[in-house]
Image (cartoon, rainbow, N blue to C red):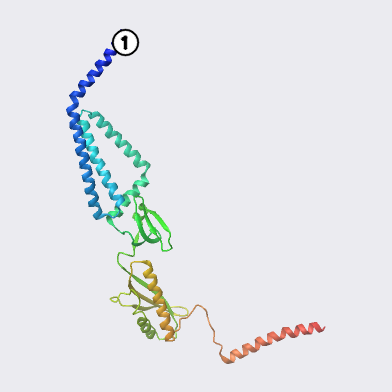
Amino acid sequence: MRSGEALQKVLAKLNSWLEQLIWLLPNLVVALLVVVVFWLMARLIQNLIVQLLRRVSSVEEMNRLVATVISFAILGVGVFIALGIVGLDKTVTSLLAGAGIVALAIGLAFQNIATNFIAGIFLSTRRPFQLNHLIETNNVLGTVQSISLRSTELRTPQGQVVLIPNKEVFEKPIVNYTVSQRRRIDLKVDIAYSEDLEKVKRIASQALEGVPFRQAAQPVELFYEEFADTSIKLAIRLWIDSSEQNDFLQARSEVIERIKRAFDEHDITLPSSLRTFDLGIASSERLLKILAEQEVSPSNERNHSSKE
């Protein structure tokens, strides 16, 4: 009897569930349609957001991540609406509360990652630099290779790859050498006091007219800065078209070569840090005589001591 009563209770429970399922069947169909519609809507909006973000951001990885997050949010709204249709309102409230707690815990646990991610979004939208730009930030000079969700990758002129967290890049000054497409070469030359300063400026200006990459619209600037101990400081400034570090280094090297060649052709002295003394002919002869006597004197003393 007891087994029969238990079986009847089980059948009654199953029958009750079946009746509730049949009663909820129209709502389940509507809820399923709502989920399908929101899923299709999320896919469509995801593709649309990717296309829009490509216009303001060159980081494809970040564009797809933002679009995926938004599409999941849209799909989540559809799921919550579907649960409300089938009468699971309390479940929706519990899911929302649990999602908030989980989001808070994840935010606290991955605070640095989230900060770098947000900084990466700002860098991709504000665009202080782009791929293949030559920049300097955090005391690192290099060409931008990639901008990921966490870091910015630079390749230095020496060939090393440096990964800098997006937070550090966003918070520190950024020098972009590519965006303006031009750079200024600053060079200082020591000129001897005995030289004609006007002649020096004229020869230097003529020598720098044909420097590679030089901007013809910007004249070469030459001016004297100060009186040093053994020379007068000549400052040279000229602008060049440059988007890469190699262009700048090549142009600066060309400037140095042309200045040295022109000064040698016109006998213009470039003093060094070494000090020279001109003793004259008479003084030189006396100095040589003294040195010769000093060499002879020790030898005579050695001979005298050997005889004893």
To which quarter of the image does residue 270 belong?
bottom left
Front one among 121 and 36: 36
Residue 140 against residue 6 in the figure, above or below: below
Residue 213 against residue 101 in the figure, above or below: below
Front one among 293 and 31: 31
In the picture, the quarter occupied by the C terminus is bottom right
Q: Is residue 37 left or right of residue 154?
A: left
To which quarter of the image does residue 123 belong?
bottom left
Query: Which SS class for mark 1?
Result: helix
| Residue name at image x 24 percent, y 38 percent | 76
Near mark 1 (Cα within 10 A), the count class, few <14, some 14-19 or many ≥20, is few
In the picture, the quarter occupied by the N terminus is top left
To which quarter of the image does residue 277 belong?
bottom right
Front one among 240 and 203: 240
Q: Which residue is mark 1?
A: 3
Q: Position of residue 201 (x, y in %)?
A: 37, 82
| Residue name at image x 22 percent, y 31 percent | 83
Q: Position of residue 298 (x, y in %)?
A: 72, 83
Residue found farthest to the top: 1
| Residue name at image x 31 percent, y 10 percent | 3
Q: Position of residue 141 (x, y in %)?
A: 39, 62
Q: Amino acid at mark 1?
A: Ser
Q: Is residue 21 left or right of residue 165?
A: left
